[in-house]
Amino acid sequence: MAEKRTNSEWLSDLRTEGFEKDDALQDLRAVIVRGLPYALTKWLSSSDPQFYDLVEEVAQETLLRVLSHLDTFKGRSQFTTWVQKIAVRLAITELRRKRWQDTSLDELVDTEGSFFGSRLMVDPAVGPEIATEQSEILAQMRRLITEELTEKQQKAMIAVRIHGMPIEEAARKMDMTRNALYKLLHDARLRLKKRMEEEGITADDVLAVFE
Amino acid sequence: MQPTDEILKQLLHHLGKTKADELGCDELFELLDEYTEAAARGQITEQLMPLVQQHLDQCHDCCEEFEALLSILKSEAA
Ligand SMILES: [Zn+2]
């Protein structure tokens, strides 16, 4: 089969000009198009009319990116896996963008009343005694969250943790990169964890009240 | 939207597994092809790239991309 190239054959074919390169690009395109339906089952059926357009667009963009980033391939995987990784990222990024484009981060946060802590409420169905215990713990958690986290951190946590917005999309709406938003959320987790330790609150204490 | 106890459980789970040093999404992307190939061969162990596993546990975005790439590799192996 034409696609059975070694990593170095892929690289040398893609670095030449002429028919070897054209063949390699065509084969690589086939690899991408064949793989994407498996990657996207959770998002889009391959019988969906949008599917074909998305795959075409992603295949095209992937090939361009591959050609301009050949020097960054370090050979730690099959070359085709590296290419498919790029295709998966491009395809899912596009699907996420479409899915969340009409959601405003500010509206999402506004409907919460205020920031993250206010989402932590006692379910009245648990009965008065447990409700008292729960509301004490929740008040403590709310205090830690509001005292320890910046508004930006709380906003990101509402979007990501409560509404399930992808970090990628929350980052886009906050004019940050995904990597930077992950780090901001990581910092938020570290702060909360440290503060809980300082106050002697363990996860088990909190969860025990909600079992 | 999630109920309070679910939010708390998830939050505490993630806090419990929070490390001072974690990979960012960019570093994760660098390792994703190699890691996913190992996973497709069933060779993921506790020792292999624990930082990658840790990030995938914290980051839904990267985890989705890992699962998508894994589905492709499994389809090729089948
Ligand atoms: Zn990530």
Image (cartoon, coloured by chain):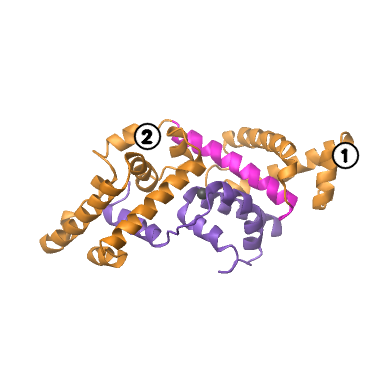
Chain colours: A orange, B purple
Residue found at the far right of this picture: A19
Position of A111 compared to A60: left or right? left
- Quarter of the rendering occupied by the C terminus of chain A: bottom left
Position of B18 compared to A28: left or right? left
- Where does residue B21 sit, x and y in percent of width and height? 49, 57
State the residue in front, B60 or A185. A185
Q: Which mark is residue A20?
A: 1
Residue at position x 43%, y 33% in the image: A173
What residue range appears in magenta? A75-101
Residue at position x 35%, y 58% in the image: A193
Q: Are marks 2 and 1 in contact (CB under 8 Å)?
A: no
Tag 2, which chain? A
Disc 1: CA contacts within 10 A as few (<14), some (14-19) or many (>=20): some
Position of A148 compared to A48: left or right? left
Residue at position x 64%, y 61% in the image: B40
Q: Which residue is mark 2?
A: A105
Which element is circle 2 on?
A: helix
Whole-angstrom CA distance, mark 2 to mark 1, is 48 Å
Which element is circle 1 on?
A: helix
Tag 1, which chain? A
A159 magenta-colored: no
State yes or no: Cβ of the residue under disc 1 lies below 8 Å from any atom of ligand 1: no
The total number of labels drawn is: 2
State the residue in front, A89 or B58. B58
- Where does residue B2 sit, x and y in percent of width and height? 32, 50
Amino acid type indicated by mark 1: Glu
Above or below residue A120? Residue A98 is above
- Where does residue B30 sit, x and y in percent of width and height? 63, 50
